[in-house]
Image (cartoon, grey):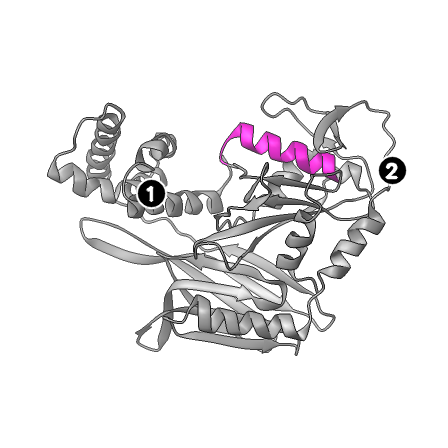
């Protein structure tokens, strides 16, 4: 079992990017350009390492090699993107790895690429890359290559040594549990459970009892053995259930209009632990979008558009508009879910202007974008 925090440290110790790992300040899967560049790097790393894992470390300043972190990213459909655009697609996972020196809401992203030992290529056009293109790593750069390339295994021993140095032990696990409970979340109720005598899951959050159900907000859930954050949210609420073999999380989103709000189940994550020291995560989308009066939504949609136009032109908002701005991301989402197709584009267009507002408004935008990402790639 590999401690992903140690793995990242060992990768960064190489300092320079290579044919088996890349580092990025951030990745953007919300645009065609961002998806295309991500696919290019995955393709190149898979072809350059046919018999061993390759990695992309996200949240690192390239020049200084320092860890700056990125927002928590939970997208169970990332493999769908890989399968849709790449022929002979590798198995790709994205994990969120917390580091002690980062703010609570920041992590380092670790993309692990497991190849098929076949040549991977673009299945179809995306952005400025043509379908059929093949990429390889040329040092630290992903470059297009000819169709008659020969894939060679040159990194297996190096990668094996790095992964071996990152293997977990009892000391790392105990330190991780103590750090989680006594340092990260000393102001919150914290819990842990051991599965199959090998896996330790810790979780913390503000507890709310409703009838016989227990819900958590400000939730942080980590698989301590691998130093992987499984779930994090400052806004939404979750319910947690576990058995001898499974840990289940149901995430709820708070949506509504005119002070009439309701919690809607968004997604269930099921983590199944196996006897052989492995585990698997499955996600089920549960979301049934709420429907609202179209006339009311037209009014809200037009009001949101007017607010964004004012922000673009640096025109001060009146008191009513200031109030509406706080819920603008959520109301754009509701409009989109009620067949206002352009509402999603309007929401994305608003990002740079909302980013200049106070932190809670921009956090609301990021949570809304996360819900959209869970539902479907654009």
Quadrant of the image containing the N terminus: bottom right
Q: Residue 152 carries which label?
A: 2
For label 2, the SS is loop
Residue to which mark 1 is pinned: 362
Relative placement, left or right, of 81 versus 219 is: right
Task: Say what secondary structure mark 1 lies in.
Answer: helix
Of residue 179 and residue 346, the one placed in the foreground of this image is: 179
Residue found at the very far front of the displayed protein? 64
Total numbered badges shown on the rendered structure = 2
Query: Whole-percent x and y of residue 77?
Result: 56, 46
Residue 300 located within the stretch drawn in magenta: no
Residue 100: % across, % down: 51, 60
Q: How far apart are marks 1 and 2 (CA)?
A: 46 Å
- Closest to the observer: 311 or 372? 311
At 56% from the left edge and 69% from the top edge, which residue is drawn?
Answer: 176
Residue at the left extreme of this rendering: 319
Residue 51 spot, x, y in % from top left: 83, 47
- In-image side of 329 versus 238 (left or right): left
> Toward which corner of the image does residue 208 lie, by quadrant?
bottom left
Q: In the picture, residue 283 is in which quadrant?
A: bottom right
User: What segment carries the magenta color?
Assistant: 30-45
Q: Nearer the viewer, residue 339 or 17?
A: 17
Give the residue at x 54% y 73%. 177
At x 45%, y 55%, the residue is 286
Q: For residue 32: magenta?
A: yes
Residue 78 in sight from this viewpoint: yes
Residue 198 percent coordinates (x, y):
66, 75
Seen at 17% across and 43% down, the residue is 323
Question: Main SS of the magenta segment?
Answer: helix
């Amino acid at each position: 079992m590999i401690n992903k925090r140690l793995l990242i440290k060992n990768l960064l110790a190489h300092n320079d990017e290579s044919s088996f790992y890349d580092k990025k300040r951030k990745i953007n899967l919300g645009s065609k350009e961002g998806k295309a560049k991500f696919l290019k790097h995955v393709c190149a790393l898979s072809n350059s390492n046919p018999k061993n894992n390759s990695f992309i470390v996200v949240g690192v300043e390239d020049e200084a090699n320092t860890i700056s972190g990125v927002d928590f990213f939970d997208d169970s459909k990332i493999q769908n993107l890989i399968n849709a655009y790449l022929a002979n697609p590798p198995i790709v996972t994205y994990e969120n790895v917390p580091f002690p020196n980062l703010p609570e809401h920041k992590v380092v992203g670790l993309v692990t690429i497991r190849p098929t030992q076949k040549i991977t290529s673009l299945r179809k056009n995306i952005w400025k890359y043509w379908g059929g293109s093949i990429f390889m790593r040329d040092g630290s750069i992903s470059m297009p290559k000819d169709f008659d390339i020969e894939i060679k295994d040159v990194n297996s021993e190096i990668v094996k040594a790095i992964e071996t140095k990152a293997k977990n032990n009892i000391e790392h696990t105990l330190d991780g549990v103590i750090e989680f409970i006594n340092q990260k979340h000393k102001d919150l109720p914290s819990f842990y459970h051991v599965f199959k005598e090998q896996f330790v899951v810790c979780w913390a959050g503000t507890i709310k009892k409703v009838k016989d159900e227990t819900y958590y907000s400000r939730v942080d859930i980590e698989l301590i053995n691998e130093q992987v954050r499984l779930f994090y949210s400052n806004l939404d609420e979750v319910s947690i259930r576990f058995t001898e073999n499974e840990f289940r999380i149901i995430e709820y989103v708070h949506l509504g209009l005119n002070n009439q709000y309701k919690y809607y189940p968004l997604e269930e994550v099921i983590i199944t632990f196996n006897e052989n020291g492995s585990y698997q995560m499955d996600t089920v989308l549960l979301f049934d979008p709420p429907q609202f009066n179209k006339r009311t939504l037209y009014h809200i949609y037009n009001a949101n558009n007017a607010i964004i136009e004012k922000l673009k032109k640096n025109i001060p908002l009146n008191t009513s508009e200031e109030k509406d701005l706080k819920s603008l991301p959520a109301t754009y989402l509701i409009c989109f879910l009620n067949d206002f197709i352009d509402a999603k584009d309007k929401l994305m267009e608003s990002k740079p202007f909302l980013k200049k507002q106070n932190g809670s408004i921009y956090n609301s935008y990021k949570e809304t974008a996360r819900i959209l990402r869970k539902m479907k790639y654009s």
